[in-house]
Image (cartoon, rainbow, N blue to C red):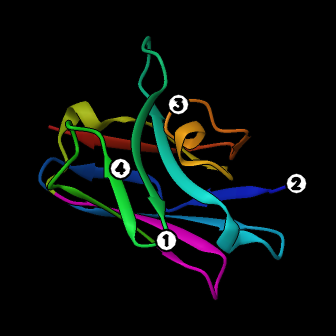
Amino acid sequence: QVQLVESGGGLVQAGGSLRLSCATSGRTFSSYVMGWFRQAPGKEREFVAAINWGRTYYADSVNGRFTISRDNAKNTVYLYMNSLKPEDTAVYYCAADPKVSTVLTAPNYWGRGTQVTVSS
């Protein structure tokens, strides 16, 4: 069982930056593939980014603007968001799964989310 707690959301102007953090419980953090998803009002939840050891995965919509990283010593995964756009406004969820294929589509473990609002 993995518990995930996101933080770092907030209100930012277009073009600005935010860093999201996801703290996890458990002693097996390094064995999990970690990811971020987001859900905008009236839209389905969508994949944003994932990281498996040294390999990273990004949605086309954020590639080049967002960076995912992890600190296994702190059991924490981060999402650095730059050049934010109003369309990035959403609730951002941290996710975890032992398998890459699953974390990209339907992770087994989820956080409760943190709101990111980008004003124009």
- Say what amino acid the circle numbered 2 marks: Gln
Q: CA distance from mark 1 to mark 2?
A: 20 Å
* Residue type highlighted by circle 3: Thr
Quick one: label 2 or label 3, which is nearer the N terminus? 2
Disc 2 to disc 4, how far (Cα)?
A: 32 Å
Q: Residue at x 35, y 41 (%)?
A: 117
Q: Is the residue marked by circle 1 packed among few (<14), some (14-19), or many (20+) residues within 10 Å?
A: some
Q: Position of residue 105 (x, y in %)?
A: 52, 31
Residue under the point 68% across and 42% down: 112
Question: Circle 2 — which element?
Answer: loop
Up-down: is 48 above or below 82?
above
Mark 3 surroundings: few (<14), some (14-19) or many (≥20) residues within 10 A = few
**Tag 1 or tag 3, which sits nearer the N-term?**
1
Query: Magenta region: which residues?
Result: 70-82
Asked if the magenta segment contains residue 66, the reply would be no
Check disc 2 and report the residue beneath it. 1
Q: Farthest residue toward the right?
A: 1
Dot 2: few (<14), some (14–19), or many (≥20) neighbours within 10 Å? few
Mark 2 or 4: in front is 2
Amino acid type shown at disc 4: Leu
Residue at label 3?
105
Q: Quadrant of residue 90?
A: top left
Looking at the image, residue 93 sits to the left or right of residue 119; the answer is right
Point out which mark residue 11 bears.
4
